[in-house]
Structures are given as structure tokens and as C-alpha cells.
């Protein structure tokens, strides 16, 4: 019984990591309209499903200035560890499927938040994936605050770049999906 619980928790952890990777990939490839296939392996056969995320209409359609992990905050300035991947390379030959993605190799970028900066928090609910087939979900956002950022937040920034600094016009962030077991 104990080992069954460990397998279930381990499987849910793999699902959470896959979901976080999926969100990061969608942020990185915001201009690419394609389906992403994910699989979960466990005892028995692998279960595969696809999820097509329709971007939130509130978010800019232009490529972002920086996408990466939140590192730190000092008042109205945040530091983002940018992803070292070029736009469009995730899953398109730059990274082999199933390989871990190194999110710590890109340069750190200082992001300045002004009174005009709009902050959005991802509140998309993935729903129940179908074991075989595809699911389409609408990405949803709500007004966010800098206080919601944590060391696991994925941040995307649109604005004006000047060297290793970006004056933010729009900041979009997502926090890891938490899965609770009853």
C-alpha cells in the first residue's frame, strides 16, 4: 500500500514537471501554433495526450523581450534568468525530446516595473486530460502583483530593452501547478 502511494505521488510529480515544462515551452514559442504531446509513464502502458493552449487575448502578440525564471526582486525591479534557447528552438531540433532543459544558462536580465506596467498572472485551469486524444484550453489571466512571484515563477516580459535591462510594459508570470492528492 505504501509503495502504491509513492508511485502515485511520483507520477503526479512527473505530471507537475511536465505541465511546468509545457507552460515554459508555450511561453518560449508564443508565436508558434502547434500541438504539444505529453506522456505519462507508469505501471502498464504509456498514456499520451495533446493540449492546445489558446493564448489569452490580454497578452501581446509580439515576441517578448525576455522569458525565464524569476531570480530576485528589489522594490520595483526584478531579475529574470533568461532561457538560453533561441525562439522556436524548443522541441524543434534545439532540444531533443525527453532531454532536460537547462534553464539556468542564459544571462540575467534586470526588469524595471513602472506605474504603467501591467502585470498578469496565469490562472489557466488545465482540466482533466483525455487518456487518448487532444484537449483545447483557453489560457486565462488575472491582474497580478509582484508579491506573487517566487523562485519557481516563469516570467515573460514585453517592453523596451536597453542592454541587459528591460523597462516592462507587460509582465506575465505563471507559478507551478500544484496537484493535491486526496
Image: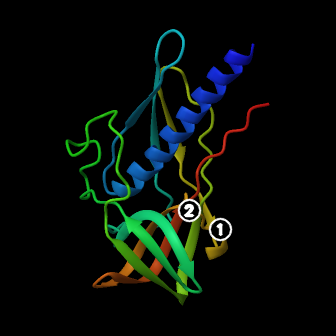
User: Residue at the spot x=40%, y=75% of the render?
Assistant: 158
Q: Point out residue 155 in the picture as x, y percentages from the top left corner.
A: 48, 65
Left or right side of 44 for 65? left
Secondary structure under tag 2 reads loop
Please, which residue is most extreme toward the bottom here? 115
Q: Does 17 sit above or below residue 47?
A: below
Q: Residues within 10 Å of mark 2 (few under 14, many from 20)?
A: few
Please, which residue is most extreme toward the top here? 44
Query: Which quadrant does the N terminus fall into?
Result: top right
Which residue position holds label 1?
148
Q: Point out residue 19 in the picture as x, y percentages from the top left corner.
A: 51, 41
User: Residue at the spot x=54%, y=49% of the render?
Assistant: 138
Residue 4, picture quadrant: top right
Residue 108, picture quadrant: bottom left
User: Residue at the spot x=58%, y=27% of the render?
Assistant: 11
Q: Which mark is residue 129?
A: none
Q: How many marks?
A: 2
Query: Which quadrant does the C terminus fall into?
Result: top right
Mark 1 or mark 2: which is in front? Answer: 2
Which residue position holds label 2?
151
Amino acid at each position: 500500500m505504501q509503495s502504491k502511494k509513492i508511485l502515485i505521488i511520483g507520477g503526479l510529480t512527473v505530471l507537475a514537471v511536465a505541465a511546468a515544462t509545457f507552460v515554459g515551452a508555450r511561453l518560449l514559442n508564443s508565436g508558434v501554433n502547434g500541438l504539444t504531446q505529453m506522456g505519462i509513464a507508469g505501471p502498464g502502458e504509456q498514456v499520451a495526450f495533446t493540449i492546445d493552449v489558446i493564448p489569452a487575448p490580454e497578452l501581446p502578440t509580439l515576441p517578448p523581450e525576455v522569458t525565464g525564471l524569476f531570480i530576485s526582486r528589489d522594490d520595483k525591479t526584478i531579475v529574470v534568468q533568461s532561457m538560453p534557447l533561441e525562439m522556436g528552438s524548443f522541441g524543434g531540433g534545439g532540444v531533443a525530446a525527453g532531454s532536460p532543459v537547462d534553464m539556468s544558462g542564459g544571462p540575467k536580465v534586470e526588469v524595471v516595473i513602472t506605474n504603467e506596467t501591467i502585470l498578469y498572472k496565469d490562472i489557466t485551469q488545465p482540466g482533466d486530460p483525455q487518456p487518448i486524444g487532444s484537449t483545447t484550453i483557453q489560457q486565462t489571466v488575472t491582474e497580478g502583483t509582484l508579491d506573487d512571484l517566487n523562485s519557481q515563477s516563469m516570467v515573460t516580459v514585453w517592453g523596451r530593452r536597453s542592454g541587459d535591462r528591460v523597462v516592462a510594459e507587460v509582465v506575465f508570470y505563471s507559478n507551478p501547478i500544484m496537484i493535491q492528492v486526496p
